[in-house]
Amino acid sequence: MTIDERLEKLTETVELLAHRQEEEWERSREEYARSRQEDERLRAEAREADARFQARIDEVLEGIDALARLAGVQGVRLDNHEGRISTLEKGTPPSTE
């Protein structure tokens, strides 16, 4: 094999390796792009789930506040009943309040 033939083979080998490397880089770039798209999709889903969760938490807190207000009103009513019962037990006629 002459030097020219060896150089020709070497050139072909280098070109083949360069082509394979370029293909590998392209596959890597495509995979990276797909990975980023998937990551963005998952992040968007997580943001939506977080917003739904926060909305539910807000609803629960509103319900707790409503129950607390109701319990306060009921507590006042019970206090009034205790006074009325006490008055009745003493034999005094109840007031018309």
Image: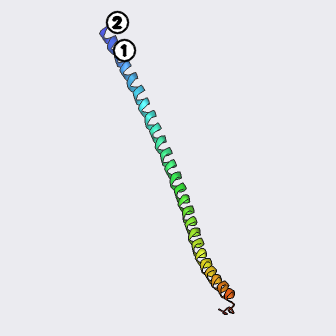
Q: Is residue 38 left or right of residue 90?
A: left
**Residue 47 at x, y = what percent?**
50, 55
Colouring method of the image: rainbow
Q: Residue furthest left?
A: 3
Q: Residue furthest top?
A: 1
Q: Residue at x 66, y 86 (%)?
A: 84
Q: Amino acid at mark 2?
A: Met
Q: Residues within 10 Å of mark 2 (few under 14, many from 20)?
A: few
**Residue 36 at x, y = what percent?**
46, 44
Residue occupied by mark 1: 9
Q: Residue at x 63, y 79 (%)?
A: 78
Q: Residues within 10 Å of mark 1 (few under 14, many from 20)?
A: few
Q: As displayed, is residue 71 above or below residue 58?
A: below
Q: Amino acid at mark 1?
A: Lys
Q: As displayed, is residue 82 above or below residue 38?
A: below
- At numbered mark 1, what does the secondary structure look like: helix, strand or loop? helix
Distance in Å between CA atoms under marks 2 and 1: 10 Å
Picture quarter with the C terminus: bottom right
**Residue 48 at x, y = what percent?**
53, 56
Q: As displayed, is residue 17 above or below residue 41?
A: above
Q: Residue furthest front?
A: 90
**Splitting the image into 4 quarters, where does residue 63 fall?**
bottom right
**Residue 74 at x, y = what percent?**
62, 77
Q: Closest to the observer: 79 or 40? A: 79
Q: Is residue 24 left or right of residue 50?
A: left
Residue occupied by mark 2: 1
Mark 2 vs 1: CB contact within 8 A: yes
Q: As displayed, is residue 81 above or below residue 30?
A: below
Q: Residue at x 34, y 11 (%)?
A: 5
| N-terminal-most mark, 2 or 1 | 2
